[in-house]
Image: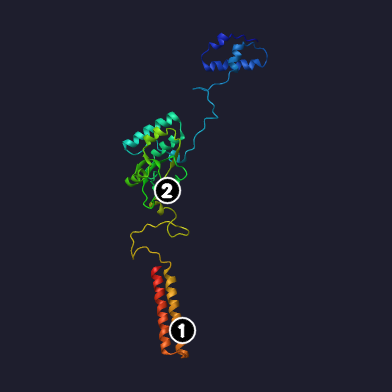
Amino acid sequence: MEIHLNSEDFLSYNLPHVKRHFCHVLVKRKSSGNDVVEPSVMDFINKPARPKTGPVRNLSVLTGIDLKAGGKSKKTKRTAPKSDDIYLKLLVKLYRFLVRRTGSKFNAVILKRLFMSKTNKPPLALSRLITYMKGKEGKIAVVVGTITDDIRVYEVPALKVTALRFTETARARIEKAGGECLTFDQLALRAPLGQNTVLLRGPKNAREAVKHFGPAPGVPHSHTKPYIRSKGRKFEKARAMLPLLISEVVRVIEMIRFHLRWLIRTQKYSLFFLRNKALQGHLEMVELMSTIRES
């Protein structure tokens, strides 16, 4: 029995289950070698299956993202400063433009540091600035933070410094030495790509609060500063040396008593000599007590 199917008749069926039925019959009868199937019908039969909806996708690429705690611990970063300072926002607007149009990594770092909090923009002392700029004369020091004065420095070289802020004395000393105190908009005109500059930062962990961070005070190998209510006689005091000092005083007293007993027992010396010996022991005691007070 031969089945002659026209491609127009076959493809005219719009119902998917009818097409599947005909495909099943054709494939089954084709194995016996009695069917005559047109090429267009065979193309439809051999056509690969498509997904029910949407375009064809590479399912091997569509992998999920494992987020800890359902996404609660995702990393975040600042994309704008928290401050309401309009001048800071103008600088952000300027350096956004420079990052977009120049692609300079220097400008990207400046923009990122403009977003930072006050803790992450620590001040830089004039003494550290002078140390860092040794051998870099002619370059511009760039600090996204404050430049402060240091009275321990007597000689200030001629420096070109760009910072968000200068203290009055620091600005006066830099300008008196023949240097320049620049703003970031002036820096953008002089070095739009960050050429001939030295990017610096202040010490982030120099705050008083950082001294209290770390292992608990008192545990082995801990150098953490304790939080105490107040400083006084009745509050937390270090007493590790007190037993050693007391034992030293007791040892000296026992030594003096031993010598006096031995001298009196032997009766080899006069009372005058005994009096001088006691005076010498008294002087040793006074000297020991003075060392205890100093320590």
Q: Amino acid at mark 2?
A: Arg
Residue nearer the viewer, 35 or 244: 244
Label 1–label 2 contact, CB within 8 A: no
In the image, which is nearer the foreground, mark 1 or mark 2?
Answer: 2
- Image point 61% across, 16% down: which residue? 25
* SS at circle 2: helix
Q: Amino acid at mark 1?
A: His
Residue 128 circle label: 2
Q: Residue at x 44, y 81 (%)?
A: 256
* Element type at mark 1: helix
Q: x%, y% of residue 65?
A: 49, 35
Q: Nearer the viewer, residue 26 or 212?
A: 212
Quadrant of residue 199 in the image?
A: top left
Within 10 Å of disc 2 (Cα), the crowding (few <14, some 14-19, many 20+) is: some
Q: Position of residue 172 (x, y in %)?
A: 33, 45
Q: Is residue 28 visible?
A: yes
Which residue ends up furthest to the right in the rendered image? 33
Q: Front-most of 180 and 106?
A: 180
Q: Is residue 235 above or below residue 97?
A: below
Q: Earlier in the sequence, mark 1 or mark 2?
A: 2
Q: Can residue 204 be seen from the camera position used here?
A: no
- Left/right placement of residue 34 relative to residue 144 reads right
Q: Residue tagged by mark 1?
A: 259
Seen in the picture, residue 206 relative to 18 is either above or below; the reply is below
Residue 154 location in percent, x, y?
38, 51
Direction from residue 35 to residue 96 in the image, left or right: left
**Quarter of the image where the C terminus is located:** bottom left
Q: Nearer the viewer, residue 15 or 58?
A: 58
The residue drawn where x is 44% and y is 30% is 102
